[in-house]
């Protein structure tokens, strides 16, 4: 009977290679994917599922977009114990959260080995010698990092591409990423997370529309029909119509300003409320 291991699986090239390498070492692999509320996966569920099915690997998900895991994750983001990048991204803290949750998951299933596709020097916040030292100390157990063990380092992907050809695997083009890393969204996340405005109910609003914050009230103005439909599902909203976008307001006291926003954006928006924009 094969020994089992878990591979932290984003869906990108590095995590796919980690799966193949651990299989080559004789392990029965389970790919564990974290569904995070602000992105970070490299491709969609279907793509990930197809790869794991073809590789004879169990594909499991820890969904951090609702319930207890969302609440815990938002607490991690709010704390930012180990600093942030250019955006609102506490990458080291985020890694520690995921690795600890992966360990809890593994312990319940009697699995001792947890592997990642990390590459030294690839990520400026979380994949440096200093960051990895902090992470390893905080989580209190040893991770297996097969790509690093093979001497792969830096941002050049030549060795990874050669390995992909060796294993005959396809992989997605790097794209997207974590919205927390976006400089232009730093103010938005800082205000929404520090004021505990994001929860399971309001999460669908975070990544859509134009956002404003005035008198401790959060507003979201729809940009198109699909965003208006999302906003109009909420009780505290002004519906769209006749060229007017839908507007969400967090509390009843915000209705007057919400109407002002709607009227302004009916006319295309004139930077009238730029000081309140987040």
Image (cartoon, grey):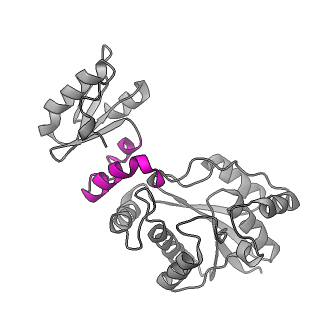
Q: Is residue 215 left or right of residue 267?
A: left
The residue stretch that appears in magenta: 181-207
* As drawn, 215 above or below 145: above
* As drawn, 156 above or below 230: below
Q: Is residue 141 left or right of residue 59?
A: left
Residue 29 showing in the rendered view? yes
Residue at the left extreme, as displayed: 253
Residue 240 showing in the rendered view? no
Which quadrant of the rendered structure holds the N terminus? bottom right
Q: Residue at x 24, y 40 (%)?
A: 276
Q: Quadrant of residue 267?
A: top left
Q: x and y percent of residue 157 in the render?
A: 75, 59
Q: Quadrant of residue 222?
A: top left
Q: Is residue 273 left or right of residue 45?
A: left
Helix, strand or loop: magenta stretch: helix
Q: Residue at x 78, y 75 (%)?
A: 150
Q: Residue at x 54, y 55 (%)?
A: 40
């Amino acid at each position: 009977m094969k020994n089992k291991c878990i591979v932290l699986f984003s869906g990108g090239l590095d995590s796919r290679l980690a799966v193949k390498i651990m299989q080559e070492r004789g392990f029965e692999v389970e790919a564990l994917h974290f569904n995070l509320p602000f992105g970070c996966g490299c491709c969609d569920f279907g793509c990930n599922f197809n790869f794991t099915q073809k590789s004879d690997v169990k594909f499991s998900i820890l969904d951090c977009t609702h319930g207890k895991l969302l609440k815990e994750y938002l607490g991690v983001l709010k704390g930012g114990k180990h600093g942030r990048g250019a955006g609102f991204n506490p990458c080291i803290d985020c890694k520690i959260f995921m690795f600890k949750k992966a360990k809890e998951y593994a312990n319940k299933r009697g699995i001792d080995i947890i592997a990642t596709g990390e590459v030294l020097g690839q990520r400026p916040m979380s994949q440096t010698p200093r960051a990895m030292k902090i992470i390893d100390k905080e989580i209190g157990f040893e991770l297996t990092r097969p790509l690093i063990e093979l001497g792969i380092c830096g941002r050049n992907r030549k060795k990874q591409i050669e390995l992909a050809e060796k294993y005959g695997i396809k992989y997605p083009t790097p794209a997207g990423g974590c919205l927390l890393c976006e400089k232009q969204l730093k103010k938005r996340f800082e205000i929404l997370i520090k004021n505990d405005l994001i929860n399971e109910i309001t999460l669908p609003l975070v990544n859509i529309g134009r956002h404003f914050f005035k008198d401790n009230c959060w507003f979201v103005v729809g940009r198109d029909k699909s965003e208006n439909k999302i906003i109009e599902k909420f009780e505290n909203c002004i519906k769209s119509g006749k060229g007017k976008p839908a507007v969400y307001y967090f509390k009843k006291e915000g209705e007057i300003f919400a109407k002002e926003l709607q009227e302004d954006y009916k006319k295309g928006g004139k930077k009238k409320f730029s000081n309140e924009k987040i």
